[in-house]
């Protein structure tokens, strides 16, 4: 099934006009919190094992310091997690099984005014089925914000992987990138033969395979292609430079449908995406008078997209994807 966002855009515009007429402010996104001089963006969560073998809820956040002074998250924000009416303890979750580094270590990093840092926080769960309400409060103020997380919808993550994918190389970058991915892609700015497809989007699957030398391949296929006859076959390189610990992936060659990909056509930095465990690939297709811009959004196969608005879910998320991952099935070589 193909659809466009035109209706959603028109509906959103109508809602904004209605709110403006009533003299109300635009509603805040539920995953974006303003806590006094600090902004928090909830990017996702997973379940990990803590140092005592307990299940721990691990949240990924963007912390933005809008104050006049440098400061760390731990000295700026106080956090409390409640499950079944009881406060949860802070969890000790090792980021790497070979070291004593924990997933919350970045909370102690000083952040300059106007800068943003991705960090994680962790709590020992009482169970993996009851919802958890997390409250964030200014350490030296009274501004607060809350999010609610349902552990029953989360995937499990191994220490050091950064995602539910378990490739087991021991390299944080490779373990995060390598594996199977699923999401959707959209065409905009269409002209020529593609003019009628403006705003159309499709589900998409992908496989990333990068070696220890930092080079590898990305294979992508949507509902009209297969893994053996893909829509995209790209050669890529991976570096540890970027805005997050997961570095940046860059295209080096290959093909997007019937046009060549070149070095730098893709520069993929997960730290620039609003959601955790997501990559955004964008580029431009031009072939004579036919052209469009494409945006591809992917998350590791097996991820529950519970933090994403319903209108931003892939078309076949409920009918095709969820039944497969609930049954712990591997990613198929074709969609639908």
Image (cartoon, rainbow, N blue to C red):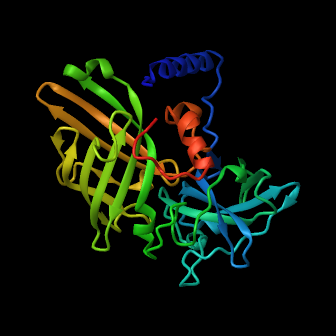
Relative to residue 117, is residue 124 drawn left or right? Answer: right
User: Is 100 or 49 nearer to us in this picture?
Assistant: 49
For residue 32, which quarter of the picture? top right
Residue 142 versus residue 335 in the image, above or below: below
User: Is 14 or 298 nearer to us in this picture?
Assistant: 298
What residue is rendered at 17% in x and 50% in y?
262
- Residue 205 x %, y %: 41, 45
What residue is rendered at 45% in x and 63% in y?
176
- Residue 210 x %, y %: 32, 65
For residue 67, which quarter of the picture? bottom right
Residue 36 versus residue 240 in the image, above or below: above
Tally the marks: 0
- Residue 316 x %, y %: 51, 34
Q: Residue furthest left?
A: 288
- Residue 51 x %, y %: 69, 78
Q: Quadrant of the N terminus?
A: top left
Residue 111 shows in this picture: yes
For residue 50, which quarter of the picture? bottom right
Q: Residue furthest right?
A: 85
Residue 260 versus residue 116 in the image, above or below: above
């Amino acid at each position: 099934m193909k659809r466009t966002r035109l209706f959603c855009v028109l509906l959103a515009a109508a809602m904004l006009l209605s709110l403006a007429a009533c003299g109300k402010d635009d509603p805040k996104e539920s995953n974006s919190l303003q806590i006094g001089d600090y902004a928090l963006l909830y990017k996702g969560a997973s379940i990990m094992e803590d140092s005592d073998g307990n299940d721990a809820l691990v949240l990924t956040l963007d912390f933005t310091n809008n104050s006049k002074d440098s400061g760390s998250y731990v000295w700026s924000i106080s956090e409390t997690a409640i499950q079944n009416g009881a406060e949860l303890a802070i969890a000790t979750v090792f980021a790497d099984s070979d070291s004593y580094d924990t997933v919350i270590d970045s909370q102690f990093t000083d952040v300059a005014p106007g800068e943003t840092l991705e960090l994680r926080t962790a709590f020992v769960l009482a169970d993996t089925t009851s919802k958890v309400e997390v409250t964030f409060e200014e350490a030296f103020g009274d501004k607060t914000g809350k999010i609610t997380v349902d552990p029953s919808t989360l995937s499990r993550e191994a220490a050091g992987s950064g995602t539910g994918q378990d490739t087991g190389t021991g390299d944080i970058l490779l373990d995060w990138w390598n594996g199977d991915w699923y999401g959707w892609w959209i065409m905009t700015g269409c002209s020529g033969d593609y003019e009628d497809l403006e705003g159309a989007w499709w589900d998409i699957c992908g496989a990333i395979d990068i070696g220890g030398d930092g080079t590898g391949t990305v294979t992508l296929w949507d509902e009209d292609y297969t893994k053996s006859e893909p829509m995209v076959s790209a050669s890529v390189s991976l570096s540890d430079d970027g805005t997050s610990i997961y570095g940046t992936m860059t295209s080096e060659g290959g093909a997007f449908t019937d046009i060549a990909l070149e070095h730098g056509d893709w520069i993929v930095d997960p730290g620039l995406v609003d959601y955790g465990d997501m990559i955004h690939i964008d580029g431009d297709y031009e072939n004579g008078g036919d052209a469009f811009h494409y945006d591809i959004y992917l998350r590791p196969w097996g991820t529950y997209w519970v933090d994403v608005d319903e209108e931003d879910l892939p078309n076949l998320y409920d009918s095709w994807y969820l039944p497969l991952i609930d049954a712990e099935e591997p990613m198929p070589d074709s969609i639908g």
